[in-house]
């Protein structure tokens, strides 16, 4: 979840990650232990995402077959996000086509 960024490797994402880890010591502490009011120095979308993670309101997409898994916010929690600068490509696979196939699909 790069929250409106083109990639998880952008300067903005790395800056927010670094600030959170420096303040709370680890990613685990940020995700599970930090008090929500103490997160007020980062983008509110990050705070909402952490709350969603803690409340188990995220969609977990497992990895496999050489691909990493990822976490997604449900549509009802994606409000007030910056729009991506990337335009939709009609040749991009649909979300259903992106899912890993099982042996029974062949």
Image (spheres, rainbow, N blue to C red):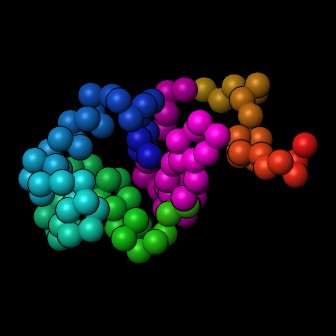
Magenta-colored stretch includes residue 82:
yes
Q: Residue at x 32, y 53 (%)?
A: 46
Q: Is residue 41 visible?
A: no
Q: Residue at x 49, y 33 (%)?
A: 84
Q: Tell me: residue 53, above or below residue 41.
A: below
Q: Nearer the viewer, residue 71 or 105?
A: 105
Q: Residue at x 18, y 54 (%)?
A: 26
Q: Nearer the viewer, residue 46 or 87?
A: 46
Q: Residue at x 41, y 66 (%)?
A: 52
Which secondary structure class fits the magenta region best? loop
Q: Which residues are magenta?
A: 60-86
**Quarter of the image where the C terminus is located:** top right
Q: Is residue 86 visible?
A: yes
| Residue 18 placement (x, y as % from top left) | 17, 41
| Residue 62 placement (x, y as % from top left) | 58, 53
In the rendered structure, the answer to whether residue 25 lies left or right of residue 61 reads: left
| Residue 77 placement (x, y as % from top left) | 49, 62
In the rendered structure, the answer to whether residue 1 lies left or right of residue 36 reads: right
Q: Nearer the viewer, residue 103 or 85?
A: 103
Magenta-colored stretch includes residue 87:
no
């Amino acid at each position: 979840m790069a929250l409106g960024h083109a990639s998880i490797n952008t300067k903005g994402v790395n800056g927010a990650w670094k600030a959170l880890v420096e303040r709370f010591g680890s990613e685990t502490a940020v995700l599970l232990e930090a008090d929500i009011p103490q997160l007020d120095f980062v983008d509110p979308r990050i705070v909402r995402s952490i709350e969603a993670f803690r409340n188990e309101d995220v969609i977990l997409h497992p990895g496999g077959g050489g691909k990493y898994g990822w976490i997604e916010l449900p549509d009802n929690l994606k409000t007030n996000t910056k729009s991506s600068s990337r335009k939709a490509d009609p040749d991009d696979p649909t979300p259903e086509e992106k899912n890993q196939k099982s042996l029974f699909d062949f």
